[in-house]
Amino acid sequence: MLYIMRHGKTKWNEQRRLQGQTDIPLGDEGRRAAEEAAKKYADIPFDACYCSPLSRAEETARIFLGGRTPVICDARLAEMGFGIYEGCRADELPPRMQTLFESPQNYLPDGGAESLESLFLRTGEFMEEIALPLSNSGKSVLVVGHGAMNAAIICRIKGIPLCDFWQALTENTALVRLL
């Protein structure tokens, strides 16, 4: 089985700021939500957990699992990079970057931001090399990541087209079974 979870809330989530690869720590609300999710899903056994190396995802994974499964960080699971726009709210973005949220199929990165192609390439590589082989061998795998990063994996698994990319966005600390 394959499960995916988005990290708990941070101060920047509350302010609706793009975090990207800026290492914003988990907030108190995010910690509480991870603890609540741990109780809610305590009966699900996980054989492996892989997460983003960003502290908000790693701390969420550690709280959620409570030591019952080791947490392994993989750089390919970092959030999508938003370049110079990290820290900005969506309404502060120039039109070229707004395209990412309004029509992702037409998005062209700007200001050092990562392309969706790059995001799909690195998360797809992780899935093919690690997550899918483990899941296909009968292991229960948990991936803890971020909004756009998780959406890339969900779109890939469920065959969601790029124009509907943001429909795959999950709530913070929501656990989604993919396979």
Image (spheres, rainbow, N blue to C red):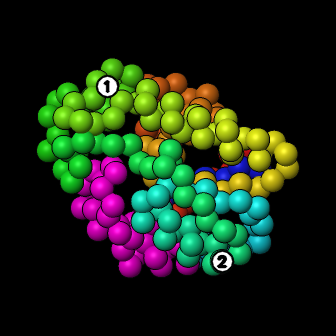
Residue under circle 1?
107
Badge 1 amino acid: Tyr
| Residue at x 28%, y 42% (from the top left corner) | 82
| Residue at x 50%, y 32% (from the top left corner) | 120
Badge 2 amino acid: Gly
Numbered mark located on residue 67 in the image: 2
Q: Residue furthest top?
A: 106
Above or below residue 175? Residue 154 is above
Secondary element type, mark 1: loop
Q: Which residues are magenta?
A: 7-35
Above or below residue 14? Residue 141 is above
Other-residue count near label 2 (Cα within 10 Å), few / some / many at <14 / 14–19 / ≥20: few
Q: Is residue 102 visible?
A: no
Residue 156, percent across and down? Answer: 59, 32
- Is 69 placed left or right of 53 in the picture? right
Residue 26, percent across and down? Answer: 39, 70
Separation of residues labelled 1 and 2 (CA atoms): 40 Å
Q: Is residue 155 visible?
A: yes
Secondary element type, mark 2: loop
- Give the quarter of the image for residue 155: top right
Residue 116 or residue 9, whichever sits in front: 116
Other-residue count near label 1 (Cα within 10 Å), few / some / many at <14 / 14–19 / ≥20: some
- Is 108 placed left or right of 67 in the picture? left
| Residue at x 71%, y 49% (from the top left corner) | 2
| Residue at x 39%, y 22% (from the top left corner) | 105
> Which quarter of the rendered picture does the C terminus lie within?
top right
- Is 140 placed left or right of 63 in the picture? right
Residue 47, percent across and down? Answer: 76, 61
Above or below residue 106? Residue 18 is below
